[in-house]
Image (tube, rainbow, N blue to C red):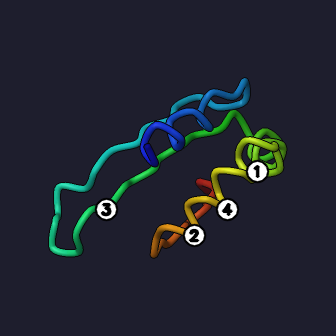
Amino acid sequence: MAIAELRAVGEWPGILSWDIALSLDTRKGRVIVEDGTFVDRAAFEEWRVTEEHVRVRKRMAGISDWWVGDWEPN
């Protein structure tokens, strides 16, 4: 269910690509990798505060031990 929810938040007009997958490295158990590319920073900032993203973010925070890295290419 978590993977389906993460895939669903990737359906947004400002997203160029959105991939959700299980890590091949299973030493830490089940690790979900999320990789998204946005049209620009404005699209990212708009997406971050959508009701759907906030809901899924809160759910994931309650069931996971996770790291997030948001970055812009140079």
Give above or below for 35 relative to 70: above
Residue 46's x, y, as percent? 84, 43
Chain-order first, disc 4 or disc 3:
3
Residue 8's x, y, as percent? 57, 33
| Discs 4/3, front | 4
Q: Which residue is mark 3?
A: 31
**Which SS class for mark 2?**
helix
**Which SS class for mark 3?**
loop
Structural distance between the alpha carbons of marks 2 and 1: 18 Å
Q: Residues within 10 Å of mark 2 (few under 14, many from 20)?
A: few
Q: Residues within 10 Å of mark 4 (few under 14, many from 20)?
A: few
User: What type is the residue that disc 3 sits on?
Assistant: Val
Q: Residue at x 72, y 24 (%)?
A: 13
Residues marked 4 and 3 touching at CB (< 8 Å) = no
Q: Residue at x 81, y 43 (%)?
A: 50
Q: Residue at x 69, y 28 (%)?
A: 12
Q: Which residue is mark 2?
A: 62
User: What type is the residue that disc 4 sits on?
Assistant: Lys
Quadrant occupied by the N terminus: top left
Q: Residue at x 74, y 45 (%)?
A: 44
Residue 48 badge: 1
Q: Which residue is mark 4?
A: 58
Chain-order first, disc 3 or disc 1:
3
Camera-side residue of 66 and 41 = 66
Residue 59's x, y, as percent? 61, 59
Camera-side residue of 4 and 46 = 4
